[in-house]
Amino acid sequence: MALHRGPYLHMKKIIRSWGSSFVLIIIYTTQFSCTNIISSSLEVSLIINECMVRNCVTTGIVDEEGRALDWIEMYNMSDDSIFLGDFFISDRLDEPMKGALPDIYLAPAAHVLLWGGQSNRSPINHLGFGFSTSNDKGEKIVLFDKEGSIIDSISYLQYDEAKKKGTSLGRITDGSTFWVMQRVPSPGYSNGE
C-alpha cells in the first residue's frame, strides 16, 4: 500500500447546537493520502467512507439499543442508486461473506451507517461482528461484491489514532483518497464539511 504523508493540513468546521446555543468547533488535522490496502480490479461507486473501530458512549453515537458499537459508513459516489444486498463487509480476506449489507437501495451521494454488532430490534443495519484493534486479528475492513471480489478496503493498522476510543477514520472529503483522523466523527453525514 502506498501511504503518502504530505504537508496536507485540513481544517474542519463543525457547528453543533446544544439547546438554543450554537458552538463553532474548528479542528485542524493532518491528512493522509492512501490507496486501497488490497488492490481491486473493479470500478464500483460504493465505498467505505468512514469507520470507528473503538466507539464509546461519550461520542453519543449509539445504536437503537443505546450501545456504542463499532461502525462503518458506506457512501454511494455514483449518480445511480446501488442495491446494497449485493455486497458484503468482512475483516478477513478468507471470509468475504462475513457480514451481509442490508437489502436496501442507497441513493446517489447518500450515506448509510452499519453497526458492527448483533441486534434483536433492528438487525437490518447490524453486521453481526465487530472489528479488532489487536495486530493478530487483521485490523482491516474489506468490502466485497457477491462474487467475493474486493471492491474497497482500508487497513487501520497504520493509524494508531484510529484505535483510540471515540476517534473515527474518514475520507476527506466524501469519496476522496485522503483519510484523516476525526475527533468529531460524522456518521451518516458528509465528511469535511
Image: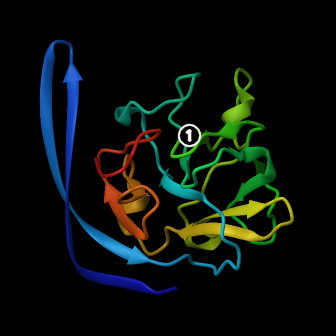
- Residue found at x 56% / y 57%: 48
Q: Position of residue 180 (x, y in %)?
A: 34, 63
Write the residue at 81% across / 71% down. Answer: 94
Q: Where is 126 relative to 10, above or below?
A: above
The correct choice, above or below, for 44 with respect to 121 in the image is below
- How many numbered circles does the render carry? 1
Residue at the image position 74 percent from the left and 45 percent from the top: 83
Horizontal and vertical percent position of residue 120? 74, 24
Looking at this view, name the residue that lies furthest to the top. Answer: 20
Q: SS class of the residue under badge 1?
A: strand
Q: Which residue is mark 1?
A: 113
Q: State the residue at coordinates (64%, 81%).
A: 39
Q: Quadrant of residue 142?
A: bottom right
Kind of residue indicated by mark 1: Leu
The answer to which quarter of the image holds residue 14 is top left
- 13 and 5: which one is in front? 13
Question: Whole-percent x and y of residue 51?
Answer: 49, 53
- What residue occupies the far right of the structure in this picture? 147
